[in-house]
Image (cartoon, grey):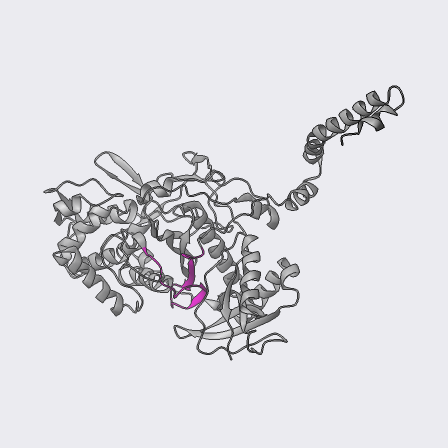
Amino acid sequence: MALSLPYRSRLLPGSAALIVLFLASLILASLTAPAEAARRSKHAKPHLRGAQHSRRATVRMPRSPTDPVKDAALVIDGATGKVLYARNENLERRPASLTKMMTLYLLFDALKAGKLTMQTPLAVSRRAAVQKPTKLGLRPGQTIPVDTAIRALVIRSANDVAVVIAEALGGTESHFAVMMTEKARQLGMRSTNFHNASGLPDPLQISTASDLATLGRRLAYDHPQYFPYFSLAGFQYKGSWFPTHNNLINRYGGADGIKTGYTGASGFNLVSSVVRGNNHVIAVVMGGRTAVRRDLEMVRLLDQTFAQIGANPAMVARATVPWQQVAQNAPAPASAGFSLPQVTSSLQNQFAALSPVPNTVQSEDEDSAEAVRAADENFSVIHAEGAAQPKQPAVAAVPAKPEPRVSANVPAVRPSPRPDNGFLTAQQANLTKTAVNVPRPQMRPSLREDVGEGDADTPSPGRNWTIQIGAYADKALASAQLAAYAGKAQDVLARASRIIAPVQSNGHTMYRARFGLFAEREARDVCSRLTQRGQTCFVAVQTR
């Protein structure tokens, strides 16, 4: 502060120097304080250091592994189709290369009917050759045998090969798309429309997690002699080795298919088939922000499902697996894997392990997109050459009409060993579990819901909104999930009632686990706060 001249004239000798020294000390303290604070923070206890950072407004909260406007997930019992877990399962989504599951289904139909053999040459048109990547690089006038075409679709997700198959079976790709949609209706896929054979971006190409789970199940049980193709780790074509995009193959215990998919409009999609003992589970995850986050969410759902099956074996059917019945012993080569950064068992630390994901994917090319890694997804590749590999079955295809050459071209199957912990040996990669959950868009209100638990579970005008965390196959499980969720969010949900709402889904009763009741704006605000923490929720209307 500036002093007036008369006042300064009354200062004692040396006072001006003392004031200058005092001001200089203040400036020096302000410059050294940040460094001292940083030093103290560095040497503070980890949990205290985390608490200090959590109070800063600049802390970036981790995002969920899926995009809320693209997210959907479903887990079903493969043997019966019973729904075990669901979220956004009936909302329209972009299937991307999951479309090729139907392309393959119709190709398997043709093989089964004897219209084609594994050696039938399929002609490559100019239209097929000019498809956008990912593709195999076929040239007009070239031919490709059916066996190679199957491998190229399953493993490479080749768009040029998808058009080759479409033109071979339908004459044109547009007519084949009509055939695909008609077959979808026959299989009970009520919300799916196909407009091309590859899954390349198309506004008319839509499906749902529920429909895609149905398709995955029908592929396995309608065409078990060809289903082993989905468990291949890769294939060789013209001197090049193409590894599968399905990172769970040979890395997650019991995983034996099915298919990945990606476009900018769909996000990263995955349908997985897992067999452990006599239990078969099919799971769908759609809208992943990256391939790794999609895989982590799939692993989380599968781990959760098999833990529930372990606690209650009667929740799923025990049945023989038809595509494993025709197995023959064959050696399996060693495989490579990847590992995620070490993550502690602490829920808070697991949330912090994944940071917000920048828009790092710049291409619709699935192969390129699958290879993109966010900053916290730098994994080391582990070659398991020294790992002892048990012999695994090789499956022979059995066409409806005898064709002696078919069995010589059927894929050798290499399903993952199934150790008790659900993962491969220590020399191989381990997909680390994560507790990061998924926010989801608003669910359509149900026509009727019966409310279970809660003191304030009678909707009133203006306060008929809930926070839904999931839908479960068992009421006790829904109640347990509500209790666990409430324990993690006491500060936000302390006054909320726990509501269990039964609803019929595909002939089975599902139990929606919800918190309520809120005004709409309050519900959306609460859900937003929870999703910023990486917890799972979306808003839904509660009706009687």
Q: Residue at x 31, y 67 (%)?
A: 191
Q: Does the magenta stretch include residue 81?
A: yes
Q: In this view, does 178 lie above or below 384?
A: below
Q: Is residue 104 left or right of residue 18?
A: left
Q: What stretch is highlighted in magenta?
A: 68-95
Q: Taking 512 as reference, is 31 left or right?
A: right
Residue 36 vertical position relative to residue 345 in the rendered view, above or below: above
Q: Residue furthest front?
A: 6
Residue at image position (42%, 65%) is 318
Please tell me which residue is depicted at 13% across the width and 54% down the height of the picture. Answer: 168
- State whether the magenta stretch is mostly helix, strand or loop: loop
Percent coordinates x, y for residue 537 in the rendering:
52, 61
Question: Where is residue 352, by image quadrant?
Answer: top right
Q: Which residue lies furthest to the left in this view?
A: 141
Q: Where is residue 536 in the image (x, y as percent from the top left)?
A: 52, 58
Instruction: Name the quadrant containing residue 385.
Output: top left
Residue 7 within the segment the image draws in magenta: no
Question: What is the x, y in percent for residue 359?
Answer: 42, 43
In the rendered image, is residue 367 in sight?
yes
For the residue pair 312 and 263, the one nearer the viewer reads as 263
Say which of 295 and 406 sits in front. 295
Can residue 403 be spotted in the picture? Answer: no
Among the 4 quarters of the image, the one containing residue 108: bottom left
Q: How many labels does the image show?
A: 0
User: Residue at coordinates 13% horizontally, 50% vertically from top-left?
Assistant: 120
Whole-percent x, y for residue 338 in the image: 44, 39
Please determine whether, in this image, residue 7 is positioned above or below residue 13: below
Point out the image quarter for the N terminus: top right
